[in-house]
Amino acid sequence: MPNTMKTVLCILTCAALLTPSQATAAGGPVASNTTYHYYYFKERKPLTLDAARVAVFSSDAANRGGVAAIGEVDPSLDVTSVAPMVIRGWSFISTIPEARTAQRVEESVRRVAGAAVAGFVSPVFFGTDGGPVVITPHILLGFHPHVDRARAEAILGESKAGVIVDRDWGNMRGAYRLRSNQADGFAVLEAANALARRPEVRFAEPDVIFTGRGGLIPNDTFFGLVWGIHNTGQDGGTPDMDMDGPEAWDVTIGDPSIKVVIIDTGVEQTHPDINQLPGIDTTAEAPGTGGGPVNECDNHGTAVAGCVSATINNNLGTVGIAPNCKSVSARPFISNVPCDGGWDSIASWTVDALVFAESIGAKVTNNSNFYGFESASIEVKYEQTRANGMVHFASANNNNQSSSTYPASLPGVNSVAALERHGARASFSNYGPDLFISAPGEDVLTTDRTGFDGWVAGDYVFANGTSFASPYTAGVAALVLSLNPDRPAWAVENILAGTAVNLGVPGWDSNYG
């Protein structure tokens, strides 16, 4: 690949959002001092209980009869406070103030589960982004390669942790998805932890509901020059501080067989200026949408996809860095309504998105989001797909902090920081030891959902964030693969690193990579 592919290396960093103690200080839910945990592989990870509420799954939880039955079983739950969650069938119910202790929450969960007035009841924990983490009835686990199927299933039978729903789950050999016969989230957490402690087991964890965000800073829409691809000094920028798109396009504008999977909140399937193929919705909320937006706040993915493959030479709006490659949407997130940039998800939905990417022969994925929960299952799937040739990118996040957020922090995912039009790290961009590469991420002209459906009234938007630097980098990787689709992931990464302009001190550094 020629030296004209001038994306710049940078390290992804972690952003700490609202912590449980901060939430309490701000008048939010009460955090319990009792210690809970789950296992990330063999690492014990603390869970902080939100003693102010529980979560229930029930087809009746939203109607008066179902709520009344729960209230009759446990008066510690305020049945006037039922709040439906974004994920269908789930609701939060507040505890009364005097019952906001770990012991009382455990008693409430046991009572409701034992009385069978809800399909499932779970404690609520705080995620790393301050949002809720909720246990579901499923357990995700994988055995070490030396454990054969007969031994693995004997262990599962002895554990009585649940019924096997999927073998080689997620196309991962030796991985299983179990459904517990317990209606109690504490019991499912305990069963998963017991399995995780076994030496034969590589990882075991509950499949959890968690929250996250896209990490974007949108502003006004208007037509302008796309400086990140071709910087002529517009708006006072530094000429040629760009990705040298026109020079790259002299070599290739991309091969249509190279697919970039956009793991996000959906990509508008009918946008006139995005070169894409139909995708998938892994949330089970809206099957058949092809991975398009479902609610009015599903805006982020359309802007991300435009950075990769907005169409070239069609007399419309903007252009992506890999305009002849194909974006393909995989939607594992359900955006919050009203639109606050956040979303809800379940851990297995990201794995399902990566399985879909495998199934269509995708070479590249982009995930411009940060998660409020760390899942071993997701890490294993990222590792497996990278080993099989898929190269992954994620946004470093926008908190000006010195570490990468999850999943950009994963070893199998390349973290991307954002540059402004003079070549400096954008003021909002994360940085630090995990950073792989930097790319333009400030005042990026990209696609918006059409008409009045997106962030602004129109089909295009100027946006800021590492959310847009990451797909720019994914698009450059797609151009590299367009010249040789058989390159392994490490070779693509080496080409990006070897042809990047070195900003900052010579060699790798924590500001630019």
Image (cartoon, rainbow, N blue to C red):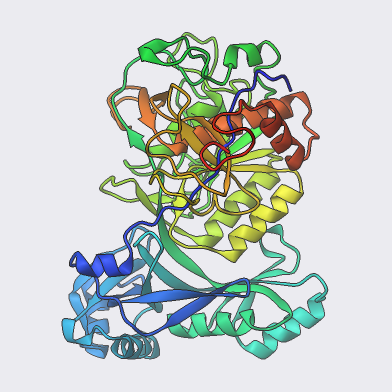
One can see residue 243 in this view: yes
Residue at 41% across, 78% down: 120
Residue 113 against residue 145 in the figure, above or below: below
The quadrant holding residue 147 is bottom right
Depth check: 3 or 406 in front?
A: 3
Residue 118 against residue 257 in the figure, above or below: below
Residue at 37% across, 29% down: 463
Residue 370 is situated, as x and y percent measured from the top left of the image, at: 45, 51
Depth check: 434 or 361 in front?
A: 434
One can see residue 184 in this view: no
Quadrant the N terminus occupies: top right
Residue at 37% across, 85% down: 34
Quadrant the C terminus occupies: top right
Residue 144 against residue 421 in the figure, above or below: below
Residue 8 is situated, as x and y percent measured from the top left of the image, at: 58, 30
Residue at 31% across, 41% down: 296
Q: Is residue 386 left or right of residue 272?
A: right
Residue 286 is situated, as x and y percent measured from the top left of the image, at: 45, 49
The number of numbered discs placed on residues in the rendered structure image is 0
